[in-house]
Image: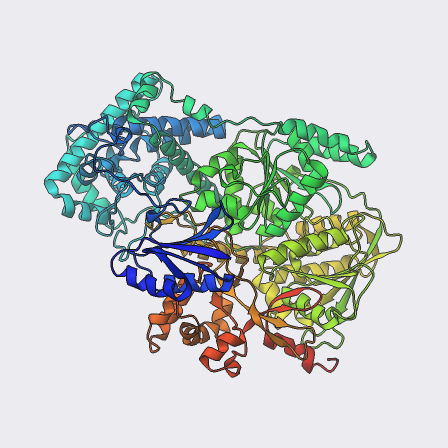
Amino acid sequence: MIVTFISQCEKKAIPRTRRVLDAFADRIGDNTWQTVITEEGLIAVKKLLRKTVTKSTAVSCHWIRGRRRSELLWIVGNRNKFNNIGVVPVNSTQKDVFMDVVTMKAKQDEFYANTHLQPLAEHSFAIGYLAQQLFKTVVDNDEYDNLSKVVFLAGCLHDLGKLDPLFQEWVKKGKRKDPEDDGQHIDVKFTFDKHPRHNEVSLLLFNFFEQQCKGLNNRQKESLQHILYWHHAKPYRQNDDFTGVYKAYEYLIKNIQVDQFEILIQRTSDLVKRINNLSKNYYANESIEKHIDWNIDQAQELKDNFEYQFKSKYFPEFKHYTNTDSIDILRDKVRINSEHNLLRACVISADRLISKLSAQDLMEYIAEHRLDELLDSQETLSNLSEHLNNVSTKFPNSERTQKQNEIAQQLADLRDIAVLAGPAGCGKTKIALEWAKLKNAKKIFWICPRVQVCQGIFQELTESYLPDAKVEIFTGEFKFTNAWDKVTPEHEYLSGEVVVTTIDQILGSIVTHSKVDSLIPFIDVHVVFDEYHEYIGMEIFNILFAELIANKNMRKKYEKNTLLVSATPHYSYLKQVLGLHQDDVIAMPSFNDRDYKIEFIDYDESVIEGNPFYQVYDGQTFIISNTALTAQLGFIYQKNQEQSVLFHSKFKRSDKKYWFNEVYEAFKKEGTHKFDVLRSGPIVQASLNITAKNMLTEMTSPENMLQRLGRLDRFGESESLNVLKVAITENVKNGSCKGSSAFFLNQLNCLQTTKAWYDFLQDQLAGQSFKLSKLYQLYKAFHTQQDQENSAIFQDMQKALKKSIDRINNKVTEPTKVSKPKTTERKSKISKNSLRGDSRFVQLAKLNLNDYAKPVFENEYAYQPPLDDTTEYDNLTESLNIIQELGLINFIAQKHGNIDPSHPVKGIPEKKQKSRCMVLENYARDADFPLYLSYIEDDLNKVGGTGVRHPEAIYYAVCDQQPIGSITLDKLHILTTSPEGK
C-alpha cells in the first residue's frame, strides 16, 4: 500500500517525528513523507510515533487508494490540527467573522444560565415546566401527582448554584468554544478540585432554606435533593474532600468570601420569586411559592441552623441499599431508586432541550406559551402496526396459532406487567409480537440478557416474522439493521421500529449521565424482556433490572406496556423482588407431545475415564457444559473421531459471529446438518431456534436445565423417547462447594437450588418418562414448595442480592465525570465501572492443537490491529482477576517494555514493579494497549528466547477444523496424563 504522512508538529516534536518518519518513508516536502509499506510496517510507525507523542505532535497518515482518491487512516497527537478527513486549515483571521459576532451582550445586573445568555430565571422555569410535562406524558398516571410536583420544583431549582459569582463572572465574559453536551455549559478548562460545582451549590442553597419549605414531606425532600445533586455526574477529584454540603459551603466561603455569600443568599431569594412570577404567568394552577417561599428576614437564624444540621451530613447516595435489608425493605428501596432514576432523567432531558435554544428563542417560547412544542418534536412516525398485522397472515390458522392468539389476548388484558411462561418451541416470539399488536405498539425494545440471545432473536425477526420492518440489533459489538451486512449509521442508533439490544445498553440510562435521557423512550415504548430469568443470579443486574420494572410499573393500569418472557419464570423472584402476582403469569401449553426422560450420570470430573464429556458422539447431539473450558477440552479430545462444531464465548469477535451462523444454519429446522455434534458452553441454551436429537448436559439450576431441554427435539419431530442425560458429581448432589463443577455453580449463586432441584426430580420422576407439560408443572410446584424463608431458592437469591448490594455500595453504578477532550475515534474502551465485571483487552499468541499432545506455537497473534482510527478491533477480553491469579500481570510487567518499546510501561524503572502493573492494567481498558497474555517467538527472542514462556500463559488455540478459542496450556494436561489419553 502507498501512504502519505503529513506532519503539523511544533517545537521539539518536529525532530522527534522526523527521525521516525525518515526511517520508514521518503521525505517529499518540508513536512510530507511518502512510501510503499506493509500493514505491519504501518502499525510499527504508528506505535513509534505514539511512544513520543506530546501536545505539540500532530501527524496524519493517508492511504493513497487511486489517482483521485485518498483515505485518512489515523492521526497521532493533536487532532485539532486537521479536520475529520485530515485536511489542514490554511487561512485564519483575527477579525470578527459575521457568523461569530455576538449580537446579544451580557447585562451586568442579569444572571445567566449558559453562554447562550439565557436568563437564569427563564432557563430554570422552562426546564421545570418541560420536566414536569415529560414526567406526566411518560408516566400518564394520576397516582404520581406528588412526584410530578417534585420534578417541577427540581427543574426550577436545579441551577440555583449558577448564581455563584465566579460562574456569573465566567459566563458574562462570552463564549470561547462550543460546550460539551452534558449540560454543564462550562466551555473552558476549569478545575473543581477546590471549588464546588453548581449542582453542589444548588443543593447547598436548598439545604440553607430547607426549613422554609412548606407542604413537602420527607420523601419529596429526599427526591428533590437527589435530583439537585445528581443532575450532573460526580466530578472526578484527585483528593476528593467534598463529602457533603457543609464542605462545599466551606470551600465556597473561602473562594468568594463571607460578604459575597450573603449577597448570594439574597440573590437566591430574588431568583425564586422571579421563577414564581413566570410560573404564575404561564399557567395559573402551578406555582412554586406554595412550597418554596424563601426570604432572608431571618438570614442569621437560617445560617445557624444550616451550620448545625448539615455539618456531618453527606451528599445524597446515588443508590441506597444495605446488606441488612429484608426482601420487603429491598423492594421498597428498589421503588424509591427507580423513581429517582426517572425524575433525574426528566430534568436532564428537559435541560438538554432548553439549553440548545438561543436566548431569544427561549424568551419567545415562554412569552407565547409554546414550550410544549419542544416535546412534540420528540414524536416519530411508525409503520410497525402494519408489519405486526402481517405476522398473523404468515401462519396457518391451526389449533396452535389459535392458542397463541388466545394467550396473547390474555396477556394484553392484564392490568399490571404481563409475564409469559412459554415452554421451549411454543412460539414465544410470535406470542410477544401478537401481544404488541394488541397493545398498538409503535416501537418495541426487545431486551436480552446476552449478545447471543440478541443474535438469535434478530435472525428470527428478520427472517421469519418482520422481514419488511426496520429491525435493528444494537449491542456493544453488533450494530446492524435488517441484515448482518447492513451496518447502522451512528446517527440512526436505536431508531428501528424493533430494537433488539442487551440490558447493558438500557442500564446505561440509570447508571450513567451521558445516556440518562434514553430512560424516557424506554418507559414510553413497548418492551419485551426476553429470557429475563438470567438476571436473577447475576450480580447487580438482578437489582437494576428490578428498578427498570419498577419504572414501567409507574405507568397507569392496563398501560404498563411490558412483557416478561421466559420458559422458566422464576416465580419466587417475580413475587418477592418484583412484587408481581402469580395471576400475572400466563402459561402457554406445550404442543410438543413427545415423550422425554431424564437420566442422571455420576462421574468424576478430575479424570477422563468414565467422564461423559470426553466420549465420542454422533447423530445430532448437543453436549452443553457449564463452562467453555469443558466444551473446549471435549472438542480437542474427540475432534478427529466425530463431525463436531465448538461454540462458546471465548472466541474473538469475528469468530464468534461466523461460528454462530454456522451453528444456526446446521441445527435449525431443516438445517444443513453439516455437523453431527455441537459442543458448547451455556451460550446456546436460550432463544436459539436450533434442535438436537440427543443431549448431554452438566447438572445446573432448574432454569438452565429446562432451557437446555428446550433444544432437545425442539420441534417435536422424534418418534422415539427423548433422553436428556445429566452429568452430576457427588459434590453437587451434596451441595458441597468442592470440585470445579460445584464451585462454579456456587459462584453463580445457584448451588443449593441445584441440589434441591436434583432431590425434587429424584422424588417426583424417579426415572419415569414424561411429557414436557408435566415437567413445567413440576417446575412450578418446585417454586411453590420453596416459597418460604431459608429454602434453597431463598438462600441463593439472598446471596446474589447481597453481592449486588456490595457492588452497588462500591460505587460501581455511580456516574463520574472525568474531563477529557473529545475525539472522533470510535475505538473500544472498557469502563472503569463495568457492570459485567473488571475485564481488560488482551492479545494472545496462536497455538495449533491439531495434535494436542504436541502443541505447536505459531509465530502469529490472534488478531491484528486495524489500520485506521475508526475500524473496531477484532479483539478479545479477559477477567483481570484471572490474569492476576495466574501471575501473568507480573510477567508482562517484567517483559513488555523490552518487547514493545512504544508502550507507556517502557519508561518505568524495573524496581517499580507495582507501578508497571498499574500502568498496564489501566492502559488495557483501551483496545490499543492490550495485555499480552502470551507472546509469539519473535517477541520472546527479544527477552531471552522461548525458554521464558510463562507456564500458565493463555493462548488462542486453533486447529484445522476451526478456532478453539482462548485457553491456558496447562489445562491440556488432563488430556495427556489421563489413563485414557491417546
Residue at position x 24%, y 29% from top? 101
Residue 710 visible (yes or no): no
Residue extending farthest to the left is 259
Q: Report the number of discs.
A: 0
As rendered, which of 792 and 472 lies closer to the eye? 472
**Residue 779 percent coordinates (x, y):** 71, 51
Image location of residue 758, percent across then percent down: 71, 61
In the shown orientation, is residue 15 left or right of residue 587? left
As drawn, the residue found furthest toward the right would be: 719
Toward the viewer: 60 or 294?
Answer: 60
Q: Position of residue 726 (x, y in %)?
A: 74, 63
Query: Does residue 336 appear anywhere in the picture?
Result: yes
Q: In the rendered view, how is the structure colored?
A: rainbow
Residue 436: image quadrant is: top right
Q: Is residue 648 above or below residue 634?
A: above
The percent position of residue 904, horizontal first and vertical second, equals 37, 66
Quadrant, the C terminus: bottom right
Q: Which of the pair 714/728 is nearer the observer? A: 714
Q: Nearer the viewer, residue 246 or 282?
A: 282
